[in-house]
Each structure stands twice: as C-alpha cells, then as structure tokens.
Amino acid sequence: MHAVDWVNVIALTRDGHAVMVEQFRHGTATVDLEIPGGVMDPEDADPVATAVRELREETGYVGERARLIGSIAPNPAILSNQCHTVLIESCVLSSDLKFDPGEDIATLLISAEELPRLVAEGSIRHALVAVAIFHFELWRRSSASRPGTPS
C-alpha cells in the first residue's frame, strides 16, 4: 500500500523538557502519551518543514535548529512510506493551536531524561514514538562523544 511519509517530533525546551501530547487513539480506544507529529502535506518541502508545522499546530511551540535525526520504514511488508524523526531545540510556547478535524490534544512537558523509562514501563506504547525516542537517544550519545557539540 502506498502511504505518504509521516513525521515525529522530538521537541526540547531550553530547560531540557520534551514537549509531549496526549490524545485519543481510535484503534486502541485509549488516550496515549506521544510526541507531536503527523503526515507530510503536499505543500511541505521536506520532513523538517512538516515537523515545524506539526509542532506549532498541535502544541503552539516553536523552536530552533530543526533537523532530521532518523528515518524508518513503519511496516515495509505492506507500506511504502517512511517515518522521519526530527529534533527541534530551544522550544518556547508562542502561537495558537490549530488542530486538524477530530484532534483533541493535551500538551505536557516531561523531562527528556525520562523518555526511555516511559517507554520501558509502557507509559509510551506507540511503536513509532518509541523508535523516535531511540533515534533521539542515539543522537544524544553521538553528540556527547563530540566535544563542543550542543546537546
């Protein structure tokens, strides 16, 4: 099946918190803790542009140094698309929300240090969110090994 690419956003505030969302998921009929994200619209130039747009629309946050830190095939057995992880740093609340039809999202700030634990304990259950957090952890490890690299 052909599907458009998806984007997940690791959005970090200046004080080290991740911008998270809680939203109802129809497939599981549960409210899930996730990161902002969504599908690439035709007018989006690339995954980074999608991430900046989705973060602003879903949470009202904007940030700096947006960049791609990973991509994965969500289900290559049946889907043709990619899911991209974009990191945006120094995020601040600065704009109004603009939900898509049917979206009802609550925004939370959670210490970025807690993300792996939240996956491990099952508080974060969405597989593609877990992959995005893994991409983020790999980026953090790589950044820590390079002197002078901002993290």
Image (tube, grey):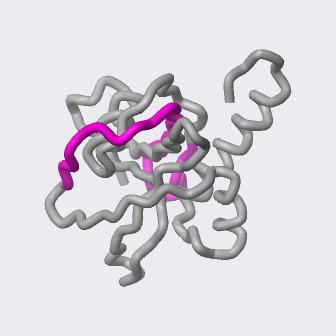
What is the tally of numbered marks visible in this picture? 0
Most foreground residue, 108 or 69: 108
- Residue 18 percent coordinates (x, y): 54, 49
Residue at the front extreme of this rendering: 15
Residue at 73% x, 37% y is 140
Residue at 47% x, 50% y is 19
Most foreground residue, 61 or 1: 61
Quadrant where the N terminus sits is: bottom left
Q: Is residue 16 magenta?
A: no
Q: Is residue 84 magenta?
A: yes
Residue at 36% x, 83% y is 29
Rendering quarter of residue 93: top left
Q: Is residue 51 left or right of residue 84?
A: left
User: Where 34 falls versus 59 (above or below)?
Assistant: below
Q: Is residue 24 left or right of residue 75?
A: left
- Residue 84 percent coordinates (x, y): 49, 40
Rendering quarter of residue 72: top right
Q: Is residue 113 left or right of residue 99?
A: right
Residues drawn in magenta: 72-99
